[in-house]
Image: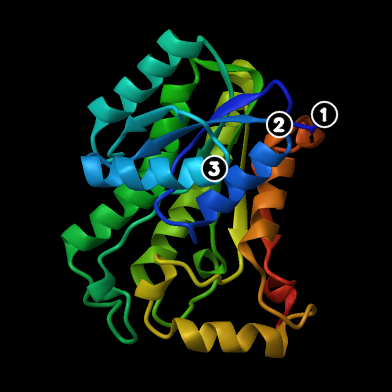
Amino acid sequence: MGIMAGKRGLVTGVLHETSIATAIAQSLLREGAECLFTHLPGDKMERRTRKIAESLGVTSPWLQPMDVGNDADITACFDRIGRDFETIDFVVHCIAYADKEWLKLGKFAATPRAVFANALDISAFSYMALGNAAVPVLKDGGSIIGLSYYGAEKAVPGYNVMGVAKAALEASNRYLAMELGRVKNIRCNLVSAGPIKTLSSSAVGGFDAILERIPQAAPLPRNIVSAEVGDASLFLLSDLSRGTTGQVLYVDSGYSIMGL
């Protein structure tokens, strides 16, 4: 029996085989969890997420369309969870977005207002919105996690407005942890993953240079792999982390501790 046996929860952001959300789902499933999945609206996106879930060994996966920029979609998702299962044990938020035209070297200061607002809405506000909507169905002692990156606290060339959005996400995590812990003993934590080549990261200008830098400077002289993020997330979603909330867990080969 795995450490997640008997637990059920929602995983968002399974868009591609290389998605970090996919690795998190794989770790959860390996340890006995039942995973429910959301996908962006549309038949194509539903088929894509279904195919990935089935490749992970999930037969007839539970799927729900959800655009986190739409409050009605968020409400509909958790209403359906309540009808179908009454309660769940965890929520995985793996959602971020910024217009890739503004994720290039030298294109931060001129970021348009609408691009800035959209990045914070999808990447940070949605974490708070999912947490709030999940309260009625999350069990006492449930766990919520999201994904951050070192660009939230240090300026990373090309990360630009996404770094600002991740900083807002980290602040939101602290406030959400404070509030939901007192309401229903719910834990809220983030995993700050080192750079991993995914469909999303390819939009960041200069990303290959970031990948080259980590092995040169990190205490563990290598880039991480998505399975390591999956297993760290597994810890935060399991009862093993029952005394941990409001934290950011770095999985980055130690790069974030270095001064130079």
Q: Secondary structure at mark 3?
A: helix
Residue 16 coordinates in the image, percent (x, y)? 42, 56
**In the rendered image, the vertical position of residue 185 relative to residue 227, given as above or below:** above
Q: Are marks 3 and 1 in contact (CB under 8 Å)?
A: no
Mark 1 or mark 2, which is nearer the start of the sequence?
1
Q: Nearer the viewer, residue 32 or 211?
A: 32
Disc 2 versus disc 1: distance between alpha carbons? 7 Å
| CA–CA distance in space, label 3 to label 1 | 31 Å
Q: Quadrant of the C terminus?
A: bottom right
Question: Which residue is the site of mark 1?
Answer: 1
Q: Where is mark 2, residue-wise?
A: 32
Local SS, label 2: loop
Tag 2 near tag 1, CB within 8 Å: yes
Residue 215 is situated, as x and y percent measured from the top left of the image, at 69, 85
* Horizontal and vertical percent position of residue 75: 32, 22
Q: Amino acid at mark 3?
A: Asn
Residue found at x 21% / y 77%: 110
For residue 182, side relative to residue 254 (left or right): left
Q: Is residue 10 visible?
A: yes
- Examine the image and state in which quarter residue 213 appears: bottom right
Q: Is residue 141 above or below residue 18?
A: above
Q: Nearer the viewer, residue 158 or 39?
A: 39
Q: Which residue is mark 3?
A: 173
Give the residue type that dot 1 points to.
Met
